[in-house]
Image: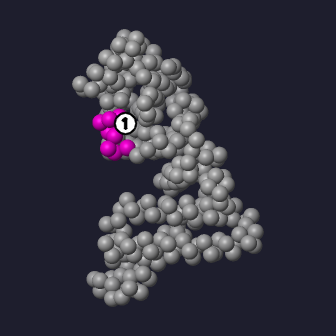
Amino acid sequence: MDSMAAKAKKWIDEKKDPRSAHWQAGIEAVMELFMPDLDKGRLTPVCQLKEEDISIFKSALAMVDLSPGLLSAFLPPSVADSILPPDSVKEWERIEKGKPSYKIIIMRPGKKKRILCAEISEYAHRPGVDIFQSGAFLGNFDYETYDSCISELPKIIRAHAWEKEKWQEKDYLTYTLNWFEKIIYLGKADVIVDRNHSFFHSPTLIKTNRIDALFLLLYDVLIHRFREDAANTCKILHEIDRAEGTGEKYKSKEMRFSACEDLAENYLLDLLNLVRTLELLDFTSFTNTENQEFQNEFVRTVRKVSAYLDEIVLH
């Protein structure tokens, strides 16, 4: 709280409106509180969601399109209800006290942090987005309904939050991975994406073709999944081993790698089936050369993933 007060005082000393200075400092304090659980480029719930919160979160997740360096928090009523703007600023009051509030906070890090605070609750009398930077209120967007607010979020975020610096290759990789993981979680294709910044849609961004881009994406998804839950992955591998009757531990390097290869192939096929089912890529348009390249990349990716899984088992 002391740092929040100091930050607000600094902005007030710079002739910023005390109301916006205190409100932005307060929002930043909320973000700092949850910072350890936030991942750049991803909309992250700040606490366990209740059943009634999940549909709202999923709707927001499909529309909140973040550049790789942005931090974003989804606040359900259990948290958002207690985060209120100053009473003296009526234009920031978007929902009546006692009504369930759903807020999205987006922060663009840097010397001059920019904050977007969105109220998206269907109970809000004025859903919309307020924008702050360096203690100053830059402006807002007001909507009559929850649906219209949600549908306009991508435009607002890209115009007022996306980082303006030139992207590096790692940024395209991160952005595309984050988009595809939303596809997997939501199980649907209509997730907002900027095709000009996704290497899956524009492979030339990373100097590759659509086959290589496909398998690079799927490889990154699987490695990220296994890295996040290495203990469970190892458990699954050992269960496969026991099911094959080889005992608690692998009898040979060949048996161990075979189990890794089976798991890698199954996971990769599941992801390819998702790409096909959701029509993310037109497989029927492949040329003969691309079909051969597809087969080669499938085998190569299985081997690469298998090698990674083998490392997990060994460690």
Determine which quarter of the picture holds residue 274: bottom right
Q: Is residue 260 above or below residue 97?
A: below
The type of colouring in the image is one colour
Tell me the amino acid under the disc marked 1. Pro
Nearer to me, 4 or 186 = 4
**Residue 175 in view here:** no
Determine which quarter of the picture holds residue 286: bottom right
Q: Is residue 88 above or below residue 95?
A: above
Determine which quarter of the picture holds residue 7: top left
- Density class for disc 1 (Cα within 10 Å; few <14, some 14-19, many ≥20) is many
Residue, far left: 2
Image check: 164 left or right of 82?
right
Residue 37 painted magenta: yes
Q: Is residue 211 above or below residue 124?
A: below
- Find residue 250 and report its horizontal and vertical position in percent: 33, 84
Q: Residue at x 67, y 54 (%)?
A: 204
